[in-house]
């Protein structure tokens, strides 16, 4: 493979993004979050930082199979006076960590443009919440995902991605989102004992392209179906259909002179 298709071993710069997401799965209200932060991407043989996931420690990598460690995260949400959770504790920043196995089901001939790939991922993660003064374990999620990717749809290095992903979670995480203990019960929000099981089905899509040699732009959208979820009778699971949107800019300031496949 020529250098034309290789990427720098490392890149550094600034990322700025804004998101509109549900306060939690099945919430009535969405909230807006925006941030700007430095970013660093490292594409090592074993440890990889940034790009397709936050951090990955690659344990096995074959042409058709990859096993690694990955992270995910979600924003916090305040239980404001007009919220369905009014009077209940706020939901803290949530992050997940755990192993994933990726199976490459299909890949078209490698070309500069028009490369297509289908992957199936099996992800199991431990979930934690934090208010940045302490960390609490919130159970586990099981998250298989079918992913389609098309590189080079409109320009050489653009990327379109579509994912379908059902989610199951243990009772501890469902308790965090959907349980109503007696001290928080009201006439409109009766006491409810949450249980583990199916959490929902998410369809997501994203598009990323180069606005200039050093600036990359991305947009994303997600649609979640929570019909038949294990806690669909919780007074806190208000919406069976929720939406999320995001957009951002990645500005690369420095890069390595060494390249990696």
Image (spheres, rainbow, N blue to C red):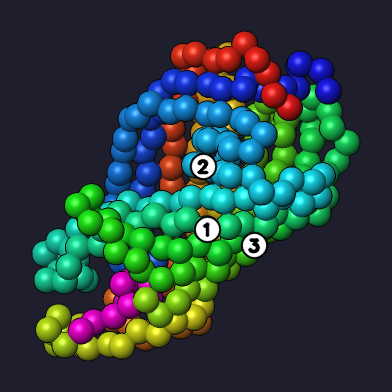
- Residue 258, visible in the rendered structure: yes
Going by the image, does 32 lie left or right of 250?
left
Q: Of circles 3 and 1, which is in front?
A: 1
Crowdedness near tag 3: few (<14), some (14–19) or many (≥20) residues, C-alpha within 10 Å:
some
Given residues 240 and 132, the one toward you in this image is 132
Note whether 182 is above or below 9 in the view shown: below
Which picture quadrant has residue 96?
A: bottom left
Question: Residue at image x 58%, y 44%?
Answer: 57
Circles 3, 1 touching at the beta carbon (< 8 Å) = no
Q: Which x, y percent locates residue 18? A: 36, 38
Q: Which of the image's four quarters has the N terminus?
A: top right
Q: CA gap, disc 3 to disc 1?
A: 11 Å
Which picture quadrant has residue 249?
A: top left
Given residues 119 and 241, the one toward you in this image is 119
Q: Which residue is mark 1?
A: 98
Q: Which x, y percent locates residue 32? A: 30, 46
Magenta stretch: helix, strand or loop mostly: helix
Q: CA gap, disc 1 to disc 2?
A: 11 Å
Question: Residue at image x 67%, y 34%?
Answer: 45
* Mark with earlier residue (3, 1): 1
Which secondary structure, mark 2? strand
Which secondary structure, mark 1? strand
Chain part drawn in magenta: 173-181
Going by the image, does 194 lie left or right of 54?
left
* Mark with earlier residue (1, 2): 2
Q: CA gap, disc 3 to disc 2?
A: 17 Å
Q: Which residue is mark 2?
A: 55
Q: Which x, y percent locates residue 76? A: 28, 54
Q: Which residue is mark 3?
A: 122
Which secondary structure, mark 3? strand
Question: Residue at image x 19%, y 52%?
Answer: 133
């Amino acid at each position: 493979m020529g250098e034309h298709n290789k990427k720098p071993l490392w890149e550094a710069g600034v990322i700025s993004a804004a998101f509109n997401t549900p306060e939690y799965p099945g919430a009535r209200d969405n909230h807006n979050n925006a941030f700007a932060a430095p970013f660093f991407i490292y594409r090592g043989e074993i440890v990889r930082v940034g790009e397709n996931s936050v951090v990955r420690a690659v344990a096995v990598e074959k042409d058709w199979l990859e096993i690694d460690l990955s992270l995910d995260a979600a924003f916090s949400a305040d239980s404001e006076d007009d919220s369905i959770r009014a009077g209940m504790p706020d939901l803290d920043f949530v992050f997940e960590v755990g192993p994933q196995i990726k199976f490459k089901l299909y890949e078209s001939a490698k070309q500069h443009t028009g490369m297509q790939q289908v992957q199936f991922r099996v992800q199991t993660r431990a979930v934690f919440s934090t208010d940045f003064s302490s960390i609490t374990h919130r159970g586990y999620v099981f998250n298989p995902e079918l992913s389609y990717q098309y590189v080079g749809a409109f320009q050489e290095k653009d990327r379109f991605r579509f994912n379908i992903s059902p989610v199951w979670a243990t009772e501890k995480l469902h308790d965090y989102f959907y349980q109503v203990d007696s001290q928080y019960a009201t006439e409109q929000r009766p006491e409810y004992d949450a249980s583990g099981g199916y959490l929902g089905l998410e369809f997501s899509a994203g598009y990323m392209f180069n606005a200039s040699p050093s600036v990359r732009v991305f947009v994303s959208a997600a649609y979640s179906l929570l019909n038949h979820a294990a806690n669909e009778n919780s007074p806190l699971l208000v919406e069976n259909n929720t939406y999320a949107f995001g957009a951002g800019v990645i500005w690369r300031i420095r890069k390595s002179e060494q390249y990696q496949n």
